[in-house]
Image (cartoon, rainbow, N blue to C red):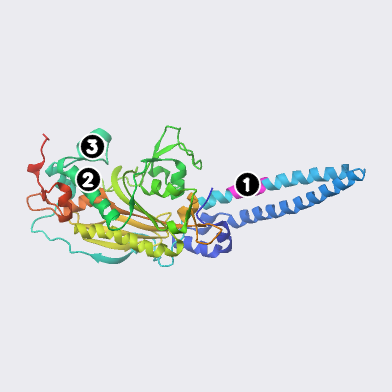
Amino acid sequence: MFVMIDLAFVRANLPLVEEKLRMRGMDPEAALGNFATVDRERRDAITQVETLKAQRNKLTEEIAKLRREGGDASALTEQTRTLKAEVDSLEATAAAADERLRELMQTLPNLPQDSVPVGKSEHDNREEKVWGEKPEFNFPAKPHWELGEALGILDFNRAAKISGSRFVVHFGQGARLERALANFMLDLHTGEHHYTEVLPPYMVNSKSLFGTGQLPKFAEDLFHCDDKGPYQPGVYQENDHWLIPTAEVPVTNLFRDEILEENQLPTSFCAYTPCFRSEAGSYGKDVRGMIRQHQFQKVELVKFVRPEDSEAEHERLTRHAETVLERLGLPYRRILLCTGDMGFASAKTYDLEVWLPGQELYREISSCSNFEAFQARRANIRYRPAGAKKSEFLHTLNGSGLAVGRTYLAVLENYQQADGSIRIPDVLVPYMNGDTVIGKHLQAGRS
């Protein structure tokens, strides 16, 4: 099974790896454990195995010669048995050490790029740009949950009755607005940005989640289907099922265990799917509204690129996500995450945060990350450079283009009017059957 950093790289750059982990706020000794000791045991065992095998091969030749000459080879034969037992024992030692190293490496996060600011938390993130003018109202701005419930387009109580907390039901023009946003995003990314649309499965196996870095670390944040029994940490099956936390998982794993040709890169996909998250670590946070839902829809952007192109492609992907916000006229800012606030698999991440006047704050609406070879190593995704015989790990990138639910609530809050209605952004009017406003009088069919 592949891991995120090549063993030889860690061995040759141990001080660098320790420093990068320290930048992430981790204790290198706790994270790496007894890496050096275990690695030395493994290498020593392998070296001894090779030496003993050479001795055994030499003895085998001598035994054959003695037998051809009619001599007694029993003593030499006994020596080969002893050597074989020693080899078997040493190979078991090496295999055990290899497994310990593999388990250790699977727990290590990606190493941040040098351009990532060093910091401990979100307070150390760096604002890179601000776009758009915040709307000014001559009335008190309301949050989206008040607007949506008053208009009859959002119903949190009935969703709780059906499914429990952290769900919502959309009605009428509200449901259409969700669909309009997704279609607008897909048309923009496939038409102008030249992504290929893909509709992947909404359930994946544990090998897929390992490949993108969700397993084993974030199992509690996922919804596991018990069709094959409970999840066993460290066991990555091909026939169990999890609900996807993001389309990043099935789309990235499209090329798992495959080798692409260089002329296939970059390959860019976009996918519109529901996303399912347990929000295990968010108890008591954002309990109102649509910020932290167990189910939400998202348009995801995924790229497979050559290593030398990944930084430029990361900037390009981020601009594609920003374009959605700009076409919708939603004020936002771009934030470069610091080392202590980055995701487990990321080498560099930009967060796009949209302005929500009803709450008077910015909220994350997209994370655009460069994973470098982290996911490619775990999922064994390679490419063959032109003219080369040997394949290499490619780089993967992804970002939300955008989270549809959060874009929805941003539209409600930024385009609200004094009478509680919502003006529809111009680019969405064709997707809303020509409607230019969402008003309560238009919500038919509900009592």
Sequence-wise first label, 1 or 3: 1
Give the distance between the C-alpha atoms of the residues marked 1 and 2, in whole angstroms. 52 Å
Q: Is residue 72 left or right of residue 415?
A: right
Q: Indicate the amino acid at tag 3.
A: Ala
Vertical position of residue 389 compared to residue 227: above or below: below
Q: Where, by quadrant of the figure, is residue 114 drawn? A: bottom left
The percent position of residue 213, horizontal first and vertical second, equals 44, 50
Tag 3 secondary structure? helix
Q: How many marks?
A: 3
Q: CA distance from mark 1 to mark 3?
A: 50 Å
Q: Which residue is mark 2?
A: 179
Q: Position of residue 49 (x, y in %)?
A: 72, 51
Q: Earlier in the sequence, mark 1 or mark 2?
A: 1
- Label 3 belongs to which residue? 159
Considering depth in this image, is 38 or 364 the residue closer to the camera?
Answer: 364
Q: Residue 210: image x %, image y %?
A: 46, 46
**Could you say which is closer to the camera, residue 218 or residue 186?**
186
Magenta highlight: main SS: helix
Decide which of tag 2 and tag 3 comes sooner along the chain.
Answer: 3
* Amino acid type, label 1: Ala
- Secondary element under disc 1, as helix, strand or loop, is helix
Residue 95, magenta (yes or no)? yes
Where disc 2 sits, the SS reads helix
In the picture as drawn, the residue positioned furthest to the right comes out as 70
**Can residue 253 be seen in the rendering of this structure?**
no
Q: For the point 11% across and 40% down, which residue is it? A: 443
